[in-house]
Image (cartoon, rainbow, N blue to C red):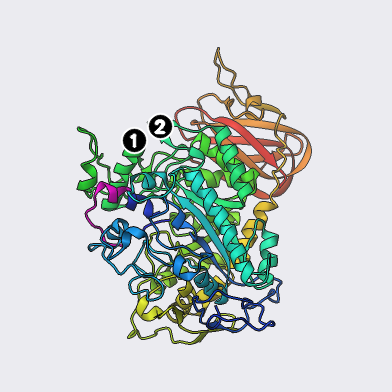
Amino acid sequence: MTRQPHHRRRPITVLSLLLLVMAVTLGPTPSSAAGTDWWNPVARPAPDSQIGVTGEPFKGTNSHGEVRGFVDAHNHIMANEAFGGRLICGKPFSEAGVADALKDCPEHYPDGSLAIFDFITNGGDGKHDPDGWPTFKDWPAYDSLTHQQNYYAWVERAWRGGQRVLVNDLVTNGVICSVYPFKDRSCDEMTSIRLQAKLTYDMQAYIDKMYGGTGKGWFRIVTDSEQARSVIEQGKLAVILGVETSEPFGCKQVLDIAQCDKEDIDAGLDELYDLGVRSMFLCHKFDNALCGVRFDEGGLGTAINVGQFLSTGTFWQTEKCTGPQHDNPIGGAAAPSAEEELPAGVEVPSYDDDAQCNKRGLTELGEYAVRGMMQRKMMLEVDHMSVKATGRALDIFESESYPGVLSSHSWMDLNWTERVYGLGGFIAQYMHGSEGFSAEADRTKALREKYDVGYGYGTDMNGVGGWPAPRGADASNPVTYPFRSTDGGSVIDKQTTGSRTWDLNTDGASHYGLVPDWIEDIRKVGGQDVVDDLFRGAESYLDTWGASEGHKAGVNLAKGASASASSSESNPFTSYAPGRAVDGNTDTRWASDWSDDQWLRIDLGSTSTVKRVTLEWERAYGKSYRVEVSTDGTTWQSAWSTTAGDGGLDTARFSGVPARYVRIHGLDRGTDWGYSLYEVGVYSS
């Protein structure tokens, strides 16, 4: 859930601040279908939305045995249940029918005067025609951020148009809920997450009922990649549950003190897994006890920083970045209404232009959560993590050869792209306008070709982020209705719900049903190659998921092995002996004398094929060093080397070589101290 940077800024009240902060956070008309048309329901509710697509959805796999279809890696079907239940108006389905589902929040009647969040996010006075069904005069719209965009029939149209994977991120924020004046339930985040998970299953049952019973509908919640493949091969939509919330497991931090512990994390991960959740964010907008966040910019960034202080007692703290990656600049733009809410004498800090990285990275509890997700074969969303946190998470994944990393909606520093692809991860771009989306797709195309992967999009519908505006009917290359789906098997016409018919050219991407139209617009603007990459998205997403499920922790050949060193730092109270780097305990370490040419040698006990060595450095790290191997302990060969070590967790990968002995040979220190390693791992895979 994120607000895109191109939206205009406005003066905001403290209520606006806390809301805006996290916000950035059917065949023909209803009738019984012919029995042979499996894609049409036996009995759709009447009245209901039309779909505007004819033709059978594609099934099966391509000639290479790969599934086909588009991936929405970031959506919020049930966000109307978040933030106290009255921020996003309307529901994705209702047993009482479309008129009940697609109606405005009660406080928006008669003219939107009390549509506070609509005023904050859309400007003006917030006034609008609250009537949804059947007229839809003012909503849904591409720039109306407070109304339901995921009505089930609109999702159905996206499926009929070629989408085969949808990630439903369960989302909420306790701070927004607590300050928003209209609510009808508790602000507890996990209570909301549980409800949204339940209602997603209820929506599946609602659709199943139209098709004749359990398991017969097109909307299929899946909990493993093989199940997802089976669903897609049947021509249906695989729905995956994710979580995007600011304080998962209650892991808030107040004055830098964590409000959760490892037991809370284990219990929280277990509960989410049991709910069917397979991907999640660890932090979002505010720093928490698990990780620091990637900043927002300008006046909005200042407002969020105030919100962070009010929530946690601390402002963001910055430092100089150590690599090409950086967090968004906070900037010095004022947010007067927000800043007025600070205690007397407290001011938003000023920040150096050359200090653009969040000091807060992945905490010890955050690392525990990352490793807990790996143990449960879950996928980690790195969007919204600070670059320091993201870098550490990627280090951990690389050290374990774990592929389960996702960037689902353009909030990751793009300099991480190749590392994500190198791990086997998946990347999707935010649902930008077709021009911007196509340009970014072209920029990263060479990397997708190098790693032979498809592409995805993250619509962030119901996520209060803003969606593609209309390009205009007078554009040189507008979408022409009707048009054929990417696979060629379906005909897609304009979408009608009630008495309103939408046209992407003049209405923009107003709701989820216009995703196929937006993809056609991309084809018009960016060309068929971009769409072809998107059509490979389902296969690539499932490749990442399946590889995560199949991951096995490697056997550390160095654990407990005999070790020797060129020197060991002397300390009367603590041992820094060589064996401390292979004892399986990251609280102990080997440390050398304070000079450059030093080494640590590990005897594996017998000759094995060695392909990977991991090094967990203490602050005294090697800037230039080699990983050397030997079968006899006398003749050594260099298997891997670097002259740009930066400490932390390093992973050296190389073609498999036979070795009984592995030596870490330090040539140039990164500090005035010696070389110090908490732990060294040696692996055959």
Left or right of 33 in this view: 493: left
Quarter placement of the N terminus:
bottom left
**Secondary element at image label 1:** loop
Q: Farthest residue to the front: give it.
A: 96
* Total tally of numbered discs in the picture: 2
Image: 309 above or below 653: above
Circle 1 crowding by C-alpha within 10 Å: few under 14, some 14–19, many from 20: some
Asked which quadrant contains residue 399, the reply is top right
What residue is shown with label 1? 314
Please state the horizontal and vertical placement of residue 468, each as a whole percent of the image. 38, 70
What residue is shown with label 2? 256
Which amino acid type corresponds to the residue marked 1 in the rendered image?
Thr
**Secondary element at image label 2:** loop
Please state the horizontal and vertical placement of residue 363, each as a whole percent of the image. 48, 36
Which amino acid type corresponds to the residue marked 2 in the rendered image?
Asp
**Closer to the camera in the image, 384 or 625:** 384
Circle 2 crowding by C-alpha within 10 Å: few under 14, some 14–19, many from 20: few
Q: Is residue 20 visible?
A: yes
Image: 536 above or below 113: below
**Closer to the camera in the image, 627 or 576:** 576
Question: How far is disc 1 from disc 2 in space, using C-alphas?
Answer: 8 Å
Identify the residue at horizontal 43%, vertical 83% (top origin): 479
Identify the residue at horizontal 63%, vertical 30% (top origin): 600
